[in-house]
């Protein structure tokens, strides 16, 4: 596993004071850190550099953090799959829900303790590392096939785009096919949200996998427990 100093983070926040404080604190925690004061600058940096994770504030003038998250997830290759942690205003659950629905991997409400931010970043990166060492064994899901070793979902010859969080979720479920997995176990660092982040990710995955997402055949809900993957 790579050390923190080898992990490159991008902090996107229009508040100069907060951006500088986050950059300094994360650098002291051992990360390599770049910063952008708006989405346009962040786009240019993403086009030139590779980032292991992005910390994105929702409330920014012009293109806000949610619009930037949507844009990033539409990018090809590793850029579009880079983990995202969004910073939201406390008491605005719609921002958190929309951010997760757009493909963010976690959220943190302001004001927050810098140490909590570091812990959440480390947790996301650990999940990413575990995902990279997932066991082999593709599973058939109707017209789709998921390869846990590569973290790839294909439909026929066409690759289906997955976020890092979606890959991690599918790998966990594919590791115990035909057996239910507890929602909070799937949630990991989202446990404080009661597993709602997992529900959002499952909804997105069903749209990508199922012929009829409203009546799922492969990614099933197990009431009172969580979810279960039932491959062909």
Image: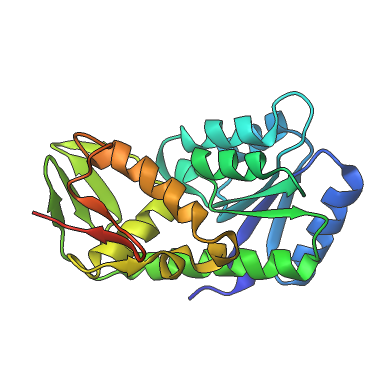
Report if residue 120 is visible in the image: yes
For residue 78, side relative to residue 24 (left or right): left
Nearest the viewer among 182 and 54 is: 182
Count of labels in the image: 0
Residue at image position (31%, 57%) is: 170
Question: Which quadrant of the rendered structure holds the C terminus?
Answer: bottom left
Judged from this view, the residue extending furthest toward the left is 232
Q: How far from the left and from the top, in percent, is residue 188?
A: 50, 68
Q: Which residue is drawn at 46% across and 67% down?
A: 184
Q: Which residue lies furthest to the front in this view?
A: 224
Q: Where is residue 10 in the image (x, y as percent from the top left)?
A: 67, 50
On screen, residue 56 above or below 116:
above
Asked if residue 221 is positioned above or below residue 75 in the image, the reply reads below
Residue 25 in the image: state x and y as whole percent: 81, 65
Residue 56 higher or lower than 76, as above or below: below
Please give the name of the residue rendered at 23% of the width and 70% of the height, measured from the top-left corner. 176
Residue 106 vs residue 137, the one in the foreground: 106
């Amino acid at each position: 596993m790579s050390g923190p100093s080898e992990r490159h983070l991008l902090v996107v926040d229009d508040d100069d004071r907060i951006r500088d404080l986050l950059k300094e604190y994360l650098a002291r925690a051992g990360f390599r850190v770049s910063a952008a004061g708006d989405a346009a600058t962040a786009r240019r940096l993403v086009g030139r550099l590779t980032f292991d994770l992005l910390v994105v504030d929702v409330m920014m003038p012009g293109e806000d953090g949610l619009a930037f998250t949507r844009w990033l997830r539409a990018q090809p290759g590793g850029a579009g799959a880079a983990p995202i942690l969004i910073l939201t205003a406390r008491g605005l659950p719609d921002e958190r829900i929309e951010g997760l629905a757009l493909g963010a991997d976690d959220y943190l409400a302001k004001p927050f303790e810098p140490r909590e931010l570091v812990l959440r970043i480390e947790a996301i990166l650990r999940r990413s590392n575990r995902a990279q060492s997932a066991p082999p064994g593709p599973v058939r899901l109707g017209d789709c096939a998921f390869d846990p070793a590569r973290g790839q979902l294909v439909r026929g010859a066409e690759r289906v785009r997955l976020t890092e969080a979606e890959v991690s979720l599918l790998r966990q479920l594919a590791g115990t096919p035909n057996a239910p997995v507890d929602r909070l176990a799937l949630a990991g660092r989202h446990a404080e949200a009661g597993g709602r982040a997992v529900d959002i990710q499952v909804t997105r995955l069903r749209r990508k996998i199922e012929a009829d997402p409203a009546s799922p055949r492969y990614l099933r809900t197990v009431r009172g427990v969580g979810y279960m993957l039932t491959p062909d």
